[in-house]
Amino acid sequence: MNWKTNLQVLDLDATQRLEVTCKACGHVHYLTHEQIIAQAPERDFLYLDELERETVCKARRCRGAVRIAMVRKGETSGFVGGMA
């Protein structure tokens, strides 16, 4: 089990964005909670792993499988450390 199987779309904040990356062509686009439920209100109850399986690439003629990642607000540091 991972975070995608534990979180539902309704658990996301209104301002939370999901980064959607195509596994085939590398195209990246972003989804918000509002965009997801605008397609169909019942999508609010999907777990994020189910959403990932249902979502396809929006690039022209690609329609490939995608990977979903959460975009964290204001967090840009990847490594914190130093030499003694």
Image (tube, rainbow, N blue to C red):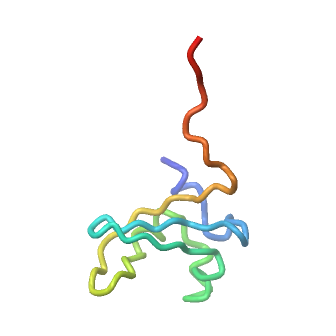
Return the x and y of residue 16 as percentages of the image width and height.
67, 66
Task: Please determine whether, in this image, residue 80 is positioned above or below residue 28.
Answer: above
Q: Residue furthest right?
A: 14
Residue plotted at (43% across, 70% down): 28
Q: Is residue 15 left or right of residue 48?
A: right
Q: Nearer the viewer, residue 34 or 29?
A: 29
* Quarter that holds the C terminus: top right
Residue plotted at (59% across, 59% down): 71
Q: Residue furthest front?
A: 83
The image shows a total of numbered marks equal to: 0
Q: Is residue 12 left or right of residue 46?
A: right
Return the x and y of residue 54 as percentages of the image width and height.
41, 75
Task: Please determine whether, in this image, residue 24 is positioned above or below residue 76.
Answer: below
Q: Nearer the viewer, residue 21 or 39?
A: 21
Residue plotted at (32% across, 70% down): 65
- Quadrant in the rendering for residue 22: bottom left
Task: Please determine whether, in this image, residue 7 is positioned above or below residue 28.
Answer: above
Return the x and y of residue 12 as percentages of the image width and height.
67, 65
Q: Nearer the viewer, residue 74 or 23?
A: 74
Q: Nearer the viewer, residue 20 or 43?
A: 20
Q: Is residue 61 left or right of residue 53?
A: left
- Quadrant in the rendering for residue 24: bottom left
Residue plotted at (50% across, 59% down): 69
Return the x and y of residue 63 as percentages of the image width and height.
31, 80
Q: Residue furthest top?
A: 84
Q: Is residue 23 left or right of residue 47?
A: left
